[in-house]
Amino acid sequence: MFRRVVRASKFRHVFGQALKNDQCYDDIRVSRVTWDSSFCAVNPKFVAIIIEASGGGAFLVLPLHKSGRIDKAYPTVCGHTGPVLDIDWCPHNDQVIASGSEDCTVMVWQIPENGLVTGLSEPVVVLEGHSKRVGIITWHPTARNVLLSAGCDNLVIIWNVGTGEAMIQLEDMHPDVIFSACWNRNGSLICTACKDKTIRVIDPRKEEIVGEKEKAHEGARPMRAIFLSDGNVFTTGFSRMSERQLALWNPQAMDEAISVHEMDTSNGVLLPFYDPDTNVVYLCGKGDSSIRYFEITDEAPFVHYLSTFTTKEPQRGMGYMPKRGLDVNKCEIARFYKLHERKCEPIIMTVPRKSDLFQDDLYPDTAGPDCAIEAEDWFEGRNGEPILISLKNGYVPGKNRDLKVVKKNILDNKLSKNAENTGTVNKSASSTPSIVSSAVSLSLLGGLSRAMEHGRLYFNKPNASGGKNTQLSYLSKSTLIGNDSSESK
């Protein structure tokens, strides 16, 4: 156990408090999927919760102020054909959220300014490249429209959402299921935790492993790994005796841990949430009824136990609010959204202070919503540090721009390749307006046929698992039939 040494820290007296019932979100059927993700994602505008859904996968998106009982008929985001496993809000646009599902796809959604009025089944873009379920989704911290996904096919894909392309595929690095993936502070590296008990630090653009530690935690249960702001890696896992452990690693020298701590013998996977501004890590165990928090410093023992917030009910999942969504006037340093079986309960963490003045030691400048670089710059090798903002006068959200996806004629390229191979389609037929006629002429080739469903173009093409439709590309109906809805089809 941790030595209860009294040491000076402004976070020693952090006080956790669950909000009253009328400020909770009630009557929500939280997902029962057996997957160790947090099932909840929050930002300064919305809280999103993965829910039980018949005939596919869905999640709720609620404006933060819409607390109380949630009507059963409340609209959901429901485009996936299998259960949703993970969701993540874009850090640079509070109305854009990505979701990964058992249906092997990643979808990116644009939520209306004031929340959903009707069900949303049309994503802005569908990203396809995984052959098994997609369990991990995480946005790049500083580059616009860069998204990482990891699936049960042991594959990590980094997407340019702005063009709908899979830019980087990290294959053959993970021999087993990936439990977690995390970007570092400027998004130049990722760290992953895998079922083979190995922690890997990867340079995704060079597609090489720059540090790894086998048997970081010797237990068989899932591990988690996150980057800290100083570049070190913090992990949670299990010992050989099934005790829960924390460890701190230096990616440049991973032979030996900087620090390892044993905690308890509970079997819930510890989900770590990290605040880079204060260097505090919060650990929320799935199935636990407590949140433990620790301060990371550069003096031994490096990981200092602060306190534990305990409630009566166990948690099914947990959402963590970015710093810019907190109430600085109440000295709030963290806010969690705890999922029960049927409700979501906000929990606020505050540092008691007598003064009403802005506490600049609690709120150093934090990462704002502006991206440092564009996707193309990052893929070309540039890095950008987070653009920081002051919270002195509270965070005032700016106007979010719509997510625009400009496909780089993926479908056209495939059509022209098929044409070259068979010689039956005119090579000049490669512009977008002629996609439909090209597809019709392609139906003569090997039984290919066209089908328009929900604004997507499908080709009947046998895939590895059997003769199912393979979706080649996402195209809106307006792209296929012209922007004028009165135009004849």
Image: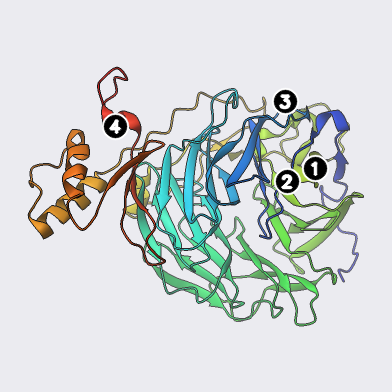
Q: Is residue 120 above or below residue 440?
A: above
Q: Nearer the viewer, mark 2 or mark 3?
A: 2
Residue at 48% across / 45% down in the picture?
107
Distance CA(mark 4)–CA(mark 2): 36 Å
Distance CA(mark 3)–CA(mark 4): 36 Å
Tell which circle, 2 or 1, labels the residue nearer the N-terminal end: 2
The 10 Å Cα crowd at callout 3, few under 14, some 14 to 19, many 20 or more, is: few
Q: Nearer the viewer, mark 1 or mark 3?
A: 1
Distance CA(mark 2)–CA(mark 1): 6 Å
Q: Nearer the viewer, mark 3 or mark 4?
A: 4
Tell which circle, 2 or 3, labels the residue nearer the N-terminal end: 2
Q: Amino acid at mark 3?
A: His
- The residue tagged 4 is 479
Q: Which mark is residue 342?
A: 1
Horizontal side, residue 297 vs residue 443: left or right? right
Say which element carries label 3: loop
Say which element carries label 1: loop
Q: Nearer the viewer, residue 190 or 94?
A: 94
* Residue 44 showing in the rendered view: no
